[in-house]
Amino acid sequence: MMLRQGLHLVRKLYRDGFKLTGLAGRQSLGQAQLPAPQPDRALTVSSWPFSSPPRDYSLPNESWTPEMQRLYDHYSALCEAETEEEKKRGPWRRLPSYNRTLKYATGGRCLSKVLQAKARLFTRNIEEPGASFEYVVFLNKQEKSCVCVFQAGHLLEGPPGHVHGGAIATIIDSVTGTLATYLSGPVMTANLNINYRSPIPLGSVVLVHSALEKVEGRKTSISCRVTSSDGGKLHTDATGLFVSINVGHLFGA
Ligand SMILES: CCCCCCCCCCCCCC(=O)SCCNC(=O)CCNC(=O)[C@H](O)C(C)(C)COP(=O)(O)OP(=O)(O)OC[C@H]1O[C@@H](n2cnc3c(N)ncnc32)[C@H](O)[C@@H]1OP(=O)(O)O
């Protein structure tokens, strides 16, 4: 019974395009602290059951370098841009990022029985600001692309002074997976193909550009390029194949 209810909420979450974006709207106004989230019309959670609002890890913190902050400001400004004709917000949107997305999106309902209470999103499981993955993703739904501003912290070392290849793969998987999810709904990574072209210095800020290549039935192909923050140097390029799933696939249903 609990499992069925949990699956229903997760399916709804995916189908309605992660209406945690109801929070995103408020946060993109630049508020560091959210008001307690209200139930979104996409989900039938009757009240916010947690004592404090969730931390949005994609907001600026004291560890961000001036370059990280500059790029954040640059893309945030695009989010606020209005189109001339309709005086609507532009196509860019900053995606909020939580370490327990399912819990926050569903108000924790039922899912405590489905998911382990200690589970945390891999890229957001270190609390110390700046120590590992500092990143923010801006989505352009119109162009079916996104850009991630990524600052690699000291815990991500691989070769001395440079970022570990597995950490680079992780951020690529996260960014391409996020884009595939927003475009195609629930997906799993089936294949990642990565070319490491030049090492990324630890502590530096890079851009992770992702774009839709094609959708063929259940398969969504995404391309990705990791460049220096000025775009002048190619660090990594990659392609990802994502296969659409029924969310029951994740819970053995
Ligand atoms: C809820 C809130 C969430 C918010 C966060 C969101 C962002 C999260 C971001 C984080 C992101 C992190 C993301 C992560 O870390 S996801 C974690 C890492 N990935 C996995 O663990 C996936 C494990 N694999 C599977 O579960 C299954 O194999 C999948 C689901 C992928 C497919 O098994 P399924 O039985 O369903 O499908 P099928 O076998 O009938 O194949 C279907 C089609 O696909 C083609 N195919 C399959 N595999 C491959 C392959 N390797 N190369 C090339 N092609 C492949 C296949 O030929 C066929 O094509 P066609 O014959 O139809 O043409």
Image (tube, rainbow, N blue to C red):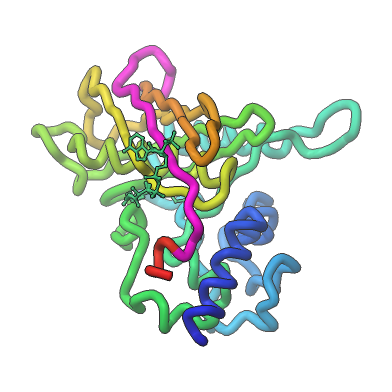
Residue at image position (33%, 70%) is 119
Looking at the image, which is closer to me, 90 or 223? 223
Q: Which residues are magenta?
A: 228-248
32 versus 180 height, above or below: below
Q: State which quadrant residue 32 falls in.
A: bottom right
Residue at image position (30%, 23%) is 236
Residue with the most extreme top position: 232
Looking at the image, which is closer to me, 78 or 148? 148
47 left or right of 33 in image: right
69 left or right of 89 in image: left
- Residue 77: give x, y in percent of width and height: 66, 35
- Residue 243: give x, y in percent of width and height: 44, 43
Residue at image position (60%, 63%) is 13
- Residue 72: give x, y in percent of width and height: 52, 37
- Residue 91: give x, y in percent of width and height: 70, 34
Residue 70 seen in the current view: no
Residue with the most extreme right position: 85
Membership of 105 in magenta stretch? no
Find ligand 1 in the image and state its quadrant. Answer: top left
Looking at the image, which is closer to me, 159 or 195? 195
Residue at image position (71%, 68%) is 40
Q: State which quadrant residue 237 falls in.
A: top left
Query: What is the quadrant of the C terminus in the image?
Result: bottom left
Looking at the image, which is closer to me, 62 or 52? 52
Membership of 247 in magenta stretch? yes
